[in-house]
Image: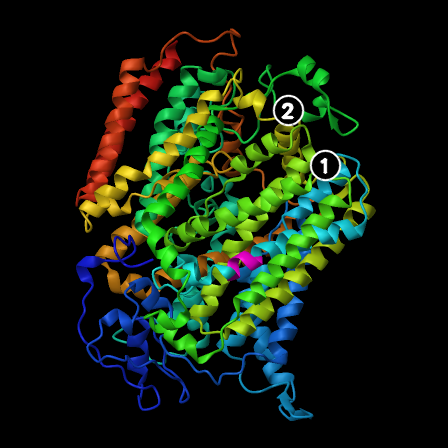
Amino acid sequence: MEHLNDPNLDFDHLTAKPVKILRAETATYSDADAESNASRGQSAPSTRSTSSRSTNSSAPIFNDESPYPEVRVAVSSVDDPLMPVNTFRMWFLGLFFTVLLAGLNQVFEYRSPSVFITGIVGQLVSLPAGKLLEWVLPTRSFKMGNFVFSLNPGPFNIKEHVCISAMINVAYNGAIATDVLATQHSFFGQRLPWTYQILLILGTQTFGFSLGGMLRQFVVWPSSMIWPSTLVSSALFNTLHTTYGKRDRGHMTRQRFFFFACAASFVWYWVPGYLFTALSIFNWVCWLAPNNVPLNALFGASSGLGMSIVSLDWTMISFIGSPLATPWWSTMNIIASVIFFFWILTPIIYFKNIFFTSFLPLSSFLVFDNTGAPYNTSATVIDGVFDLVSYEAYSPVFLTSAMCMGYFVAFISFGSIFTHTFLWFGRDIVRRFRSTLKTERDIHSRLMLAYPEVPVSWYAAIGTVSTVLVLISVNLFPTGLPTWAAIIALLIAVALALPLSIIQAVSNQVIGLNVVEELLAGYIVRGQPVANMIFKSICLAGTQQASSFALDLKLGHYMHIPPRIMFTIQVVAAVVTCFVVTGVNSWMLGHVPGICTPDAPDHFVCPSTNVFADAALIWGGIGPERFFGANGLYTQLLWGFPVGLVAPIPFYFLARRFPKSNWRYVNIPVFCGGVAAIPAASAYNYAAWGLTGFIFNYYIRRTHFRWWMRYNYILSAALDAGLAMSSVIMFFVVVFPAGGFTVNWIGNTIWQTTADTMGLPPPCLADRHVRTHPVVNLDESVQLCVYLYFSLYVSLAAKSLSLSFLLHCLYTLICISKRLSKIAIL
């Protein structure tokens, strides 16, 4: 948490010159000054704004200005403590959008195709709504005893807007446990009362909130915990609420840039999203030879390796998050991982038929049976209970080569997060157990001293109540989850919350550990699919909600929202969301006939719930022992755990030995955990994401730094906003009505007829036996892997980072392409 070896800190440009901090009350700003300050992340303050004066006139520059240019460009370093926040407008709009987005997203979660209304839609729509209330509400004051308030205390301001958006962020994702309830109802025939439903959802959701609040001194207050995704929101808030006036030396104002980019994104998405969908999955090489399996395996976007790289659809590029908000070092770790694990090792596993993967598609999020067909989990269940005899009569479960590799890197990332956190942040964590906000030197922490902080006991009380709710729900109702197992799940969430939040705070990467949590649940509560689901939901909701609430707390920290107001709105939004999603979920399950079945009306087939149920049956019914036990087919994948424990160690000592070298950019949890979305996401998503990140956060940042400072985060917000609004309108205009309207022409069908889209017909299915033709012999495989491994980290340590790395990767891919192409003539 200190700046030593900080990958986000540019040591070459960090200076410690004395600075003079002027009090904002005496400072005057011209329009040109305001636009110039925008490039440093500042905005013209009001007459009541305050700035924190350094206690030492010779203090380093990062005492009075963030040392991170990303923060300086997005976050204002002045504050107005008298700005009204706890207003009627804020509460009315916050609760309205909380109920609206939570309810709508819960309804459409069960539909396929669906629409998902993201937080940025609420962030944009709430601004004109706030301005409308500013116009229509009376301005007179009301007195109730000693309390005086007004429905309209002045112009709708930025802090009210931030609070409304924070409530929306709590609500729009819904609750993870709703999938548990739908699975119990539709797949296991359990009709449990509404009391159980609300207890489970309230307990799992609010427990993560309490964890997030208790992590403040570790991941919110330190300036090095920058949370890159919050910078996009901060930049957008400041852009929407600040009038910069005239252009400065010909530059377009950031407001105008945002609206132009947002409009362009809105219009353009109709092309790859509806009119010319081939531009979305732009695997043009596969169009030239749609039946060539090796070619589709290399360049395919659906079940291939995604080497096509280019996509013209922001939904595909930002599928794993905005590349414009992710630091380049983090992007480089993930792209290196994709190349090594999925572009090198995965095809070797596939074409050499390791784990019988040549009988299956190369990459798929599905699991398969011994005929190469998708695994039918219902064939192993009788009356909602796993049946061993039916399982043995049917088939074992087989994984694709990409899923095998995904499990392996997930195991590595699980082990590495503890070692990495201990080595890099262990001393800081111990020190910060005794720290307070007053000990922080950061300008934003000093500005927040104007507001009373939330006592830790408030968050501890919520954590205690949520724990009781969870234990009541699993004990008083037939869940199959013992109390001691539920406590273990809560402790796992506690253990993972801090390291996962730290990694997300510095790298913008959410490390998914679903597989590991399901694996642990399978060993802890054996043969209990429902208990497996609930155990996983407790772990998953605890860690995800902790990071999510900590992220919103950091947004409040950046935007200088009073902490106790932030606490109140998050608690209220979380509780309201739980009641809304529980009510909507219960009503739909009871009133939509045939819901979660293939014949459900209006396509309410519950795609996510089906995946949830399959996972419960596989891990809770079949069990991990049949995968990874002594006689399991995939036992060797468990080597990922010890590899993960030791992998961060050499890079840590190299970074300590060479503190300003590129070794400090090597982050094993990000390297492995960043690709956890594969194979649900495709390597094609990562390739397109990485290419965009290279263009903006490496090339443009180095060659056009002022443009990058001024517009990068605004562009990210504009692309997200235009896409979100376009997708919502497109769904209700051309997808939802009357079964939808389609445009049938070659631009929408050419990509659907390739071997990649149809699941890469395995090359060994024709003769139904394992191929013995070595595509890449063992010596060549070892040489290529060793070559890539060393070239990767030599490139990271070299100054010519991008050129050296890309040349090495290009040479390696050419070698593999030549060898894989031999399969076409075998």
Task: Give the label on residue 480, or none.
Answer: 1
In the image, residue 640 above or below residue 426: above
Coordinates of residue 753 in the picture (x, y in percent): 52, 28
| Residue 261 visible, this orientation | no
Task: Look at 39% across and 65% down and name the residue there.
Answer: 435
Along the viewing direction, whichever of 699 and 78 lies nearer the viewer: 78
* Classed neighbour count for the residue bearing mark 2: other residues with Cα under 10 Å, few (<14), some (14–19), many (≥20): many
- Main SS, magenta residues: helix
- Based on the picture, tell me whether residue 210 belongs to the magenta stretch: yes
Picture quadrant of residue 370: top right
Q: Name the residue under label 2.
A: 622
The amino acid on which the numbered mark 1 sits, given as a three-letter code, is Gly
Q: Give the range drawn in magenta.
A: 209-213
Q: In this view, does 691 lie above or below 144?
A: above
**The disc labelled 2 sits on which kind of residue?**
Ile
Q: In this view, does 529 lie to the left or right of 699?
A: right
Residue ID at (57%, 29%): 366
Q: What element carries label 1?
A: loop
Q: Can residue 257 be seen in this view?
A: yes
In this view, 422 is above or below 21:
above
Viewer-nearest of labels 2 and 1?
A: 1
Could you tell which of marks 2 and 1 lies nearer the N-terminus?
Answer: 1
Query: Alpha-carbon neighbours of circle 1 within 10 Å: few (<14), some, or many (≥20)?
Result: some
